[in-house]
Image: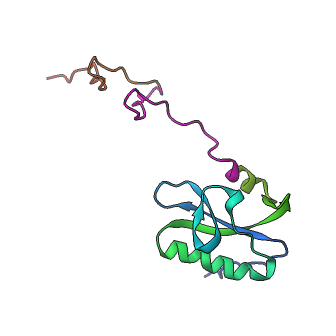
Amino acid sequence: MSTPAKARPATAPMVFTANRLRDGRVVWLAAGGAWAGRLAEARVFPPEEAAAGLALAQAGERAQQVVGAYGTEVALRGGLPVPVKFRERLRAQGPSVAAEPRGMDGLAEPRGMDGLAEPRGMDGLAEPPAHRLAS
């Protein structure tokens, strides 16, 4: 049986991040325990208050607002937090994949196994496959 890894004490200002449970988007712990979609809105905790920040982030998990909450060190530039680690800088920039193309109805177009959009009929609905089952 292994023991859980011990967290090292914070030595730099920290922010807390997670994924919003409703849609999976990256969010940042903001003032008052709210979750914000932009890193610029994140509450920055000094190293000595990092444990309190983690407790507040974990409260968001217990309330089923977010999942996977954790802290990351930041540097302050121009009064705004900038993550020290590349992974967090990438998360702060937003999704790293393009969104699915949208049809005229605003919904993502269905994709076939070849990755191409499925053909649509005159009514705008996806056409059924052209193959037939053998009898």
User: Residue 28 appears in which quarter of the rendering?
Assistant: bottom right
Outermost left residue: 135
Which residue is located at x 55 percent, y 77 percent?
59
Majority SS type along the magenta span? loop
State the colouring used for the structure image: rainbow
Q: Position of residue 70 (x, y in %)?
A: 65, 69
Q: Position of residue 92 (x, y in %)?
A: 69, 53
Is residue 107 magenta-colored?
yes
Q: Position of residue 14 (x, y in %)?
A: 76, 70
Q: Is residue 55 above or below residue 97?
A: below
Which residue is located at x 42 percent, y 30 percent?
111
Q: Is residue 120 left or right of residue 30?
A: left
- Counting every numbered tag in the picture gives 0
Is residue 52 magenta-colored?
no
User: Residue 30 appears in which quarter of the rendering?
Assistant: bottom right
Which residue is located at x 80 percent, y 71 percent?
13
- Does the image show residue 134? yes
**Magenta region, residue range:** 91-115
Q: Position of residue 34 (x, y in %)?
A: 57, 68
User: Residue 51 appears in which quarter of the rendering?
Assistant: bottom right
Q: Quadrant of the N terminus?
A: bottom right
Q: Quadrant of the C terminus?
A: top left
Closest to the observer, 29 or 71: 29
- Does the image show residue 9? no
Q: Is residue 57 above or below residue 126?
A: below
Q: Is residue 1 left or right of residue 108?
A: right
